[in-house]
Image (tube, grey):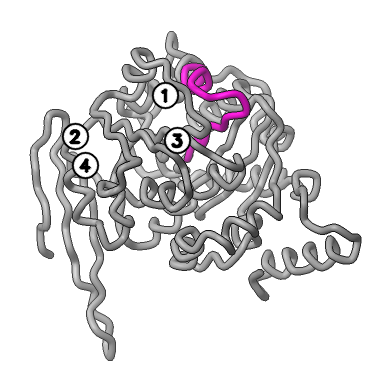
Amino acid sequence: VNVLFYREGINSSVMVEETLIATPGLPPVEALTLTVDGKVEATTGDDTRTQVLQGHIPILVHGPTERVLLIDLLNGVTAGSILRHPVKSLTVVEREPVLFEASESFASYNNSPSLDPRLERVADSARSRLLADTATYDVIVVPGMEPWLPQSASLVTSEGIDLLKARLNRGGLLALRVPLASTGEGALRAVLRTFAGAFDSILVFQISQEDLLLLGSSEPLALDVGWFRNVISSTGEVSRDLRRITVLGPNEILYTFRLAKDGLRQVLGYRPGNDDDRSPVGFASVRELTFHSNPALMAAVESAWTSILPHLTNYGASSDEKSEFLYNLAKSYLGIAGD
């Protein structure tokens, strides 16, 4: 193990470690790990897929996007994926300023967002910044949730989500990644119910075995296949970034779709959500500070799996084209072929 970076910042201690993984008959493979206050926050391993998808999916679903807000930089991979798109600006709010420097250790993995003039760095707590700055955005991405930490817990209460929603432009979209291992089932359900209560239109994607990505908007959300295909095929930087996680076209993204709002309501029921006053999620997460797998919740999601068809648009000009697309999408679900 080689320590590439270590710094004690204003709020946290940050370290980047390099490990060489040896496989018989093959050259060693470099693996980088970002640790914040002793907890692994990001790696260049399996979670790279999650980091990349949570940057691309919100913009692909939203459509043409100019202004994006990202809460938390981590290793910069999500920021780099967002900047593969022709957005005009990306504002990153990061509570620990040292992470801006630490992310440069991941330059070969994150497309060097720190060198992009469209990136605006803001060193502040997210909720404080949202209260102080009334700027609005087309897309806001919250790429994680650690509800045992006050700064994270404050974003997943009804008041926190309403504040994020208030910073969206008309037709804007909020993306929240919910790590299933972050807390117990009751707390997760409360977060999901709170999110579901805030938006008229919701799409839920499962971007890894342990991660759900929730998209919410006050306007109807749709999956415009023609737009997906055009962006992925015509924007070389987007295509190259997705290919490194074996996404060759729209189908590999579309088959991660799981639920819309009605399906999410079916999973959750109508019990109370999470609010600033009681903060049940924050308290429960501190009491249950351990690894969670939440198989019952995932089983409920699987049982309520919503058909993607009502949410697809622009996927064929004729019935034959539509049938061919749906046939190929079905093959992608089965792992037979891509796009």
Indicate the quadrant where residue 47 lies.
Answer: bottom left
Region in magenta = 161-177
Q: Earlier in the sequence, mark 4 or mark 1?
A: 4
For the question of whether residue 303 can be seen, the reply is no
Q: Which mark is residue 68?
A: 3
Tell me which residue sits at (39%, 58%) in the image.
48
Label 1, label 2: how far apart the Cα atoms are: 19 Å
Q: Which mark is residue 97?
A: 2
Indicate the quadrant where residue 335 lies.
Answer: bottom right
Label 2, label 4: how far apart the Cα atoms are: 6 Å
Q: Which residue is mark 4?
A: 100
Q: Say what secondary structure mark 2 lies in.
A: loop
Q: Which mark is residue 155?
A: 1
Q: Is residue 93 above or below residue 211?
A: above
Q: Where does the image place residue 214, in percent across and percent down from the top left?
A: 56, 38
Tell me which residue sits at (10%, 58%) in the image.
3
Q: Is residue 162 above or below residue 152?
A: above
Residue 94 in the figure: left or right of residue 261: left
Badge 1 density bin: few <14, some 14–19, many ≥20, Cα 10 Å: many
For the question of whether residue 135 can be seen, the reply is yes
**4 or 1: mark nearer the eye:** 4
Q: Are marks 2 and 4 in contact (CB under 8 Å)?
A: yes
Label 1 sits on what residue type? Leu
Label 3, label 2: how far apart the Cα atoms are: 19 Å
